[in-house]
Image: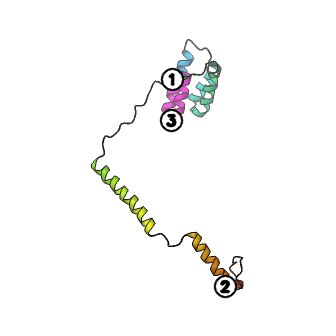
Amino acid sequence: MVQQAISFLANEPDAKGTSEALVRVDDALNAEDQDGVDIPVLEQAKAALNAGNADGARPLLQSSIKAAVASLKPATGDETGTTIVVPPLRRNGSLSGSDWVLLILSLFVAVGGAVFSYRLRPPENLGALGNDIRAVRALIPNQSSTPSRGGDDNVH
C-alpha cells in the first residue's frame, strides 16, 4: 500500500494524487500485517501529506519501507509483476492511392536530384582548381606566400 501511495505521488502530482496517496497511507496504517514498515516514519509521511507537502512525503514513504524492500530478492523474467502487454502495431494494409502518388513523387525528386547534381557539377574538381591557383601564384613575381592581413602591403 505504501508503494501504491508512492506511485500516486509520482504519477499524479496534483491534489487527486495526494488524496489517493493519503488513502493508501491510511490503509497501510490500519493494516493487520505491517511487517517491514517503519510506522513512525509512515505517520510523519501522513502528516506531510495532510499539510499538502507531497514532495516532502515521498522520501518519507520510501524510507518507511526501506527494510521491506531490501529483504526482497530481485525479480527476474515473468516475476517482474508486469501483466500488461502492449499489442503490436497494426499495419494499414496495402498502399492507398495517395500513398502511391507520394511514393512516385519522392522517387522522381530523388532521381531528379541525382541527375541535376551530375549535370550541374563544376568542370574542374578541387584538386585541379588548387593546381591552377598554384600555377598562377608561380607566374606572379614578388608574390608573398603568407596570407594578407588586409593592409596595403600586398597591393601590386
Viewer can see residue 80: no
Image disc number at residue 14 = 3
Amino acid at dot 2: Ile
Amino acid at dot 3: Asp
Picture coordinates of residue 53, whole percent (x, y):
59, 33
Q: Quadrant of residue 50?
A: top right
Q: Nearer the viewer, mark 1 or mark 2?
A: 2
- Please name the residue that numbered disc 1 is placed on: 23
Query: How crowded is the residue under tag 2: few (<14 C-alpha within 10 Å), some, or many (20+)?
Result: few
Q: Earlier in the sequence, mark 1 or mark 2?
A: 1
Q: Residue at x 61, y 26 (%)?
A: 62
Determine if the magenta segment contains residue 5. yes
Q: Main secondary structure of the magenta part?
A: helix
Q: From which residue to which does the magenta span run?
A: 1-23
Circles 1, 2 touching at the beta carbon (< 8 Å) = no
Q: Nearer the viewer, mark 3 or mark 2?
A: 2
Q: Quadrant of residue 42?
A: top right
Mark 3 → mark 1, Cα distance in angstroms: 15 Å
Q: Earlier in the sequence, mark 3 or mark 1?
A: 3
Viewer can see residue 17: yes
